Amino acid sequence: MASSPGPQRRDRARPRRLLVAGYALWGDGYPNARNTVRILREHLDLPVISCGFRLPEDFHLWRLARAGKSKAAFWLTRLLLGNLASAILVLARARRNDIVYVPYPSIFLLWLLSWIPRRWRPNCICDAYITLWDTLFEDRSLGGASTGWASRVLLSAESRALRAAERVVVDTTANADHVSARFGLHRSRVSAIPLAIDTPNHAAATSLAESDGIINVLFVGTFVPLQGTAKIAEAIALLRDDETLRFTLIGDGQDAAGVADALLSNPRVSWLRHWMSPAQIEAHMRSTDICLGVFGGSGKASRVLPFKLYAALAAGKPVITQRDYGLPDGVPAIPARLVEAAPAAMADAIQQLARAEASREALSSRANQFFEEHLSARRIAAHWRAWLT
C-alpha cells in the first residue's frame, strides 16, 4: 500500500538555501544534477551549499553487479561511508526552511536519513528518474531473478529510502506512476518534470542533403534492450542498398556484440564506440539530418523521453522514435515521426522522411519551439518555484 503524504511543515516561508547532498554523479553521463543546480542558481537565485561529494565520472552502479566481490565490496563501503559523511553535514547545517536536494544515486543517503524521526529529518527532494532496482532487475537483468532474495532486499531498501523524501522527482508521468506503484509511494509525492540538460549551442537547423544529396541519420545511446539497438541494426540492414542514406551510431554496451557483424560490414555505417563528450556529440548532431530515438518497445522504453531527444529537439532536428514514449506532467506530444518499434516500420519511416524534405523542414521548425516552451530550463525552474513557496 502506498504511504500517505508526510506532515506538512508549519513554516510556509520561502526556503532560504538549497543544500546539495549525497555521494552523487555530476559528470557528462548523468548531467541532471549539475544542470538542476545551475538552473536553480540562475533562475531562482537560491544560495547553494554543498554538503556532498562527487563520484568519479565513469562510475556506474550497474557495473558493480558484474564486478568481483572485492571491488563491489570496496565501492559499496565507499558509498555508504561517503553518504554517512554527507548525512552528518546535512544534519549539522540544515535549517528549518532549507531544502536538501539529493541527486542520483539517492538511495544511500535517503536510506540513512530514513532512520531519523520525521520531525527532525530535513526536507529532501530527490532524483529518482533512475532507480537502482529497475537498473539491476528490469533494465539489464544483472542482479538475478526479480523475485529472488537480492531483489526483495533491494526493493525494500529503496522503497524505504524514497519514502524518506518529501518529494521524489522523475522525468515522465508514466515513470511517476511506475515509481509510485513499485516503491509504495503516495502518488502526490512523485512529480514528473523535464530533465535538466546542457542546452546545445546549435546553429539554425539546415538540411545537409542540399549540398551532397546524402541524408545523414544519427543514433546516440547505450547498446541495451531499452534503446532497441538490435532493431535499429536490422532496420539499417534493410536499407543497405539505399545509396542516399548514411548512418552514424555513437555508443556501446551489452548488446553491441550481437549487432557488431551486421554494422561493421555495412559500408554506409560509421560506428563510433568510444566515449564522447557532450560537445563532441553536439558536433555530430549539427551534421545530421535525422535523429533516431528509442525503439525498445514496451516496459521502460515506453516510459522515457531520453536526454538525446531533448538535445535533438533543442537543436531543431527531425526525430524518428517509437510510438509509445513518456512525457513530463502537462507536456503535449513531441513533434516527431512516430513508428512501431519493428525493423520494417523503422526502415520505412527513415526512407520516407529522408525523401520528404518538406516534412523534415516542418519537424525541424517545430522542434526548437517545442523544447523552449515545454522542456527548457525555464519550465524546470517553474516547477521548483512552486515547490519552494
Image (cartoon, grey):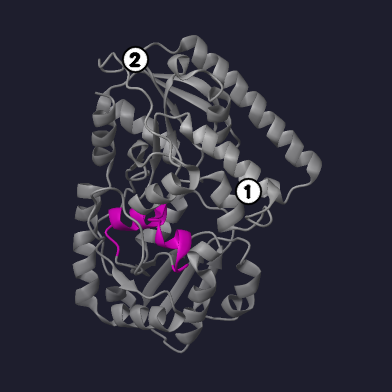
Q: Residues within 10 Å of mark 1 (few under 14, many from 20)?
A: some
Q: Quadrant of residue 59?
A: top right
Residue 311 among magenta residues: yes
Disc 2, SS? loop
Which residue is disc 1 drawn over? 62
The reply, left or right, for residue 50 in relation to residue 169 is: right
The reply, left or right, for residue 385 in relation to residue 172 is: left
From the viewer's side, name the closer residue of 58 and 5: 5
Q: Looking at the picture, how far across and down is residue 66, in whole percent?
A: 72, 51
Region of the chain picked out in magenta, as a range: 295-317
Q: Looking at the picture, how far across and down is residue 32, in whole percent?
A: 42, 40
Residue at x-position 51% and y-position 10%: 92
For badge 1, the amino acid type reads Trp
For badge 2, the amino acid type reads Asn
Tell me if residue 329 can be seen.
Answer: yes
From the viewer's side, name the closer residue of 112 and 271: 112
Which residue is disc 2 drawn over? 97
* Residue farthest front in this picture: 1
